[in-house]
Image (spheres, grey):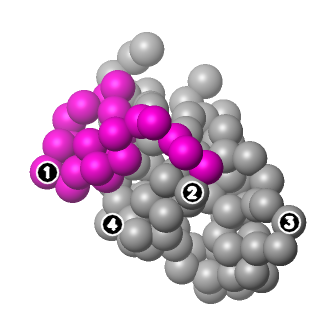
Amino acid sequence: MNNDTRHHIKFLRQLAIRDAIVDSSGFRITSATIKEHLHHDGNIIDVDALLDPSDRQNVCLAFALLKALSELPDAPPGSTPAFHRARETLKTFGQSALERTE
């Protein structure tokens, strides 16, 4: 992995934890939303570590966050429309972020 890719991964993580993910219709994803979705499915990863804004240089954490987002399952049946929308936005962000780092 070259330096440009590392910087790109860290930048994308910073977007996620700084509440800067916005979909095309203006729907904003916050770090609290990310935490909710990662915890909702029993994710055993340390979500607080993944979202720690003071750890800006950890490429492994940045990659782990993007991977966790990209691998979120579909929203469970009966979820609210907002939950469905947030889940799809998070998955799309994670997947497209990882595609850009290849």
Residue at 54%, 79% (x, y): give it.
28
For marks 3 and 1, the one nearer the N-term is: 1
Query: How far apart are the alpha carbons under marks 2 and 1?
Result: 24 Å
Residue type at tag 1 = Ser
What is the x, y in percent for residue 101? 55, 30
Label number found at residue 54: 1
Label number found at residue 18: 4
For marks 4 and 2, the one nearer the N-term is: 4
Query: How far apart are the alpha carbons under marks 3 and 2?
Result: 13 Å
Label 4 close to label 2 by CB (< 8 Å): no
Residue type at tag 4 = Arg
Disc 2 vs disc 1: which is toward the camera? 2
Disc 4 vs disc 3: which is toward the camera? 3
Q: Is residue 61 magenta?
A: yes
In the image, the segment drawn in magenta is: 41-62
Label number found at residue 11: none
For marks 2 and 1, the one nearer the N-term is: 2
For marks 4 and 3, the one nearer the N-term is: 4
Residue behind mark 3: 77
